Image (spheres, rainbow, N blue to C red):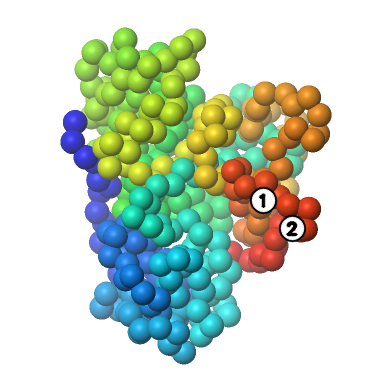
Amino acid sequence: MGPMTPVPRRVDPAPGLGRLPLDEAVWATILAASRLARRFSLPDRPTAYAPDRASGLRSLGAHAPKAWLDWCPLGGWSIASGCPAEARDMLDLYLPLLPTGTDGALAIGHLGQSLDGSIATGRGDSCFVNGPENIRHLHRLRALCDAVLVGAETVAADDPRLTTRLVSGDNPVRVVLDPRRRLGTDRRVFQDGDAPTLLVCADALAGSGPLGRAETIGIPAANGRLQLDILVERLRGLGLRRLFVEGGGVTVSAFLDAGLLDRLHLTLSPLLIGEGRRGLSLPPAASLGDCLRPACRIFRMGGDILFDCQPGRPQTESEPAGGEAAFVRVL
């Protein structure tokens, strides 16, 4: 199996404010910066960029007054001083997710849940725990990544399409984790052909061939659980270096517990479900001092609150919860 790439879609380049609605103009700028970085086409010196209708981003040299973005080989992306104030909130959320070096690898998880920690009712109804702003956020994360990963339970319950149909951007490769190979060919991801799709199962079951239009890859498994570190390496070997672990709770929890997530987005909705399906579920800690307390930033998405967490970077005593970006509005 050779390298895999997302399915290209036509995207209008960033025209700047005044040509598109605010969220579309800023998103087009972010998408153009992401594509530039993922092609490893970034300069080896500090460079400023502004939205450009012809090429998505236009290089202006260093520290240009009309620039929206600054690039520095040592520090990565930052918001330029000349960027319009109304564009800064969305840039602040997404710029840290863009590639900054020659590796470009990223693994980000996301869960949308209620105030009492459920991602669905006990019967599996999850449409929609979070509001439309967070649904668009999901589609943006797909567009920024090479592959979107979901567990078999999510595919069985929701029959998701896992495309970027609500925003501009390429459809990622769809990766379905089904260790016991329980899913049938009736699920849309195996039939619609909208994006390349991989079914990941235990090694012993991989010889059964493809499932619908999905190619099959086998990964070592024990007690019905895939060895996720091996899976990540296999995907990177296929050119899928930027991974979005979208759900469900069991799958995101497994990646978090294995230390494989660089970032975790948790979105809380003002909703009480009661006895529902849990979101994160980790092994119990002996004391609060042993609990994971990651550095995080907080963003508002409509009526929801998004926590942008870095599991590998603990929050310091001098660092306020939420950081400087607490409760900014993201369209």
Quarter occupied by the C terminus: bottom right
Query: How many C-alpha atoms fall within 10 Å of the one at disc 2: few (<14), some, or many (≥20)?
Result: few
Is 283 displayed left or right of 39 in the figure? Answer: right
Q: Nearer the viewer, residue 224 or 150?
A: 224
Compared with 245, 226 (above or below) is above
Q: Quadrant of residue 231?
A: top left
Quarter occupied by the N terminus: top left
Compared with 325, 59 (above or below) is below
Provide residue 274's location: percent of width, then percent of height.
75, 31
- Mark 2–mark 1 Cα distance, whole angstroms, equals 8 Å
Query: Which residue is painted at 38% across and 17% down in the image?
Result: 220
Is 62 displayed left or right of 258 in the figure? Answer: left
Mark number displayed over residue 295: 1
Q: Nearer the viewer, residue 11 or 68?
A: 68
| Residue 21 visible in the current orientation | no
Q: Give the residue type that dot 1 points to.
A: Ala
Is 291 displayed left or right of 73 in the figure? Answer: right
Do tag 2 and tag 1 residues touch (Cβ < 8 Å)?
A: yes
Compared with 294, 125 (above or below) is above
Is 85 displayed left or right of 223 in the figure? Answer: right
Provide residue 33's location: percent of width, then percent of height.
37, 66
Query: Which residue is painted at 44% across and 55% down in the image?
Result: 140
Query: Which residue is painted at 63% across and 33% down in the image?
Result: 279
SS at mark 2?
loop
| Residue 147 visible in the current orientation | yes
Count all numbered tags in the image, as a single digit: 2
SS at mark 1?
strand
Provide residue 159's location: percent of width, then percent of height.
42, 32
Mark number displayed over residue 240: none
Provide residue 57's location: percent of width, then percent of height.
33, 75
Q: Give the residue type that dot 2 points to.
A: Glu
Q: Which residue is mark 2?
A: 319
